[in-house]
């Protein structure tokens, strides 16, 4: 079904920050397409929640690190909705370990999903934006990409890479009316952070001037701004959502 509503494509949209972004953009009237890897039930729950806001939704099982899977996923969104107006590269994983103990596979998996995945999506989605001479690409980085973190060399490298990717693609696509920005969340309450030991959580909270963790919805609000016409003159930027952790 082709709909005249704007369309947002959110990777890793079945839980956490991705889910919050999908729901928030639905409130702004976007038809929503999300990708997910494993959890069919969670993905369908997001679809149903999104539809409550009077828009249509689609969940696509897709490993963003796989070049041709992403190509097919983007084609599916175009087939279903007719366009892609906003891309949110949110899919990400962690495989934490100290550099001397880190296995090659742990490095490769994180780089492939977090960084190559964003490249894959931009590669295939941007050509449809270029045809319309309009679009917004929003990449989810992390404050870890700005400051580093012990035991997360792979994750920090992938998220720093996202920032470099954002700025480079912003320069390439600006003449086509497409903006490209990054959002760098800090310590946000998600499944990924809930598994941390209490002493680690406490240490992180002490480093945050606002003295609390962020909520996925607070990241989603910044993404919604970047997806709106209010941000039309902003491109190549990194916006931290971190309670002041990085200043």
Image: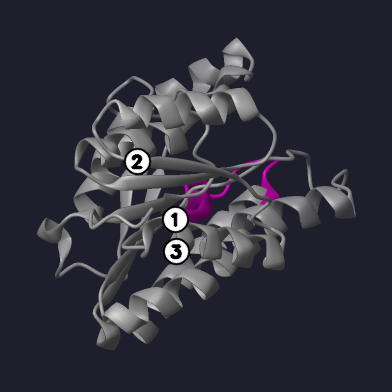
Q: For label 2, count other residues whose C-alpha is less than 10 Å away and answer few (under 14), some (14-19) or many (20+).
A: many
The residue sitting at the top extreme is 198
Q: Residue 41's spot in the image, x, y percent?
A: 60, 23
Q: Which residue is label 1 attached to? A: 80
**Element at label 3:** helix
Question: In the image, what residue occupies the spot 14% across and 70% down?
Answer: 233
* Residue on which the image places disc 2: 56
CB under 8 Å between discs 1 and 2:
yes
> What x and y, as percent, mark residue 9?
42, 53
Tell me the residue at 56%/25% (across/down).
42
Label 2 and label 3: CA atoms lie apart by: 13 Å
Magenta residue span = 142-154
Whether residue 98 sits left or right of residue 81 in the image: it is right
Q: Is residue 35 above or below residue 167?
A: above
Q: Residue furthest front?
A: 1
The residue where tag 3 is placed is 78
């Amino acid at each position: 079904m082709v709909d005249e509503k704007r369309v947002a494509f959110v990777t890793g949209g079945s839980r956490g920050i991705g889910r919050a972004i999908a729901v928030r953009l639905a409130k702004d009237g976007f038809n929503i397409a999300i990708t997910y890897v494993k959890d069919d039930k969670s993905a369908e729950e997001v679809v149903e929640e999104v539809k409550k806001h009077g828009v249509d939704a689609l969940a696509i099982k897709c490993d963003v690190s796989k070049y041709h899977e992403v190509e097919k996923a983007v084609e599916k969104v175009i087939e279903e909705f007719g366009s892609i107006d906003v891309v949110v590269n949110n899919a990400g994983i962690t495989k934490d370990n100290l550099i001397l103990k880190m296995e090659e596979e742990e490095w490769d998996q994180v780089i492939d999903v977090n960084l190559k995945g964003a490249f894959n999506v931009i590669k295939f989605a941007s050509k449809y934006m270029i045809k319309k001479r309009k679009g917004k690409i929003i990449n989810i980085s992390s404050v870890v990409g700005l400051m580093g973190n012990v035991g997360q060399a792979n994750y920090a490298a992938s998220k720093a890479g996202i920032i470099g990717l954002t700025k480079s693609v912003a320069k390439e696509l600006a003449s086509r009316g497409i903006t490209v920005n990054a959002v760098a969340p800090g310590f946000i309450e998600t499944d990924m952070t809930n598994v941390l030991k209490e002493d680690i959580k406490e240490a992180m909270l002490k480093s945050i001037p606002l003295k609390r963790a962020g909520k996925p919805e607070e990241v989603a609000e910044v993404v919604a701004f970047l997806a709106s016409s209010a941000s039309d003159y902003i491109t190549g930027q990194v916006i931290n959502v971190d309670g002041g952790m990085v200043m």
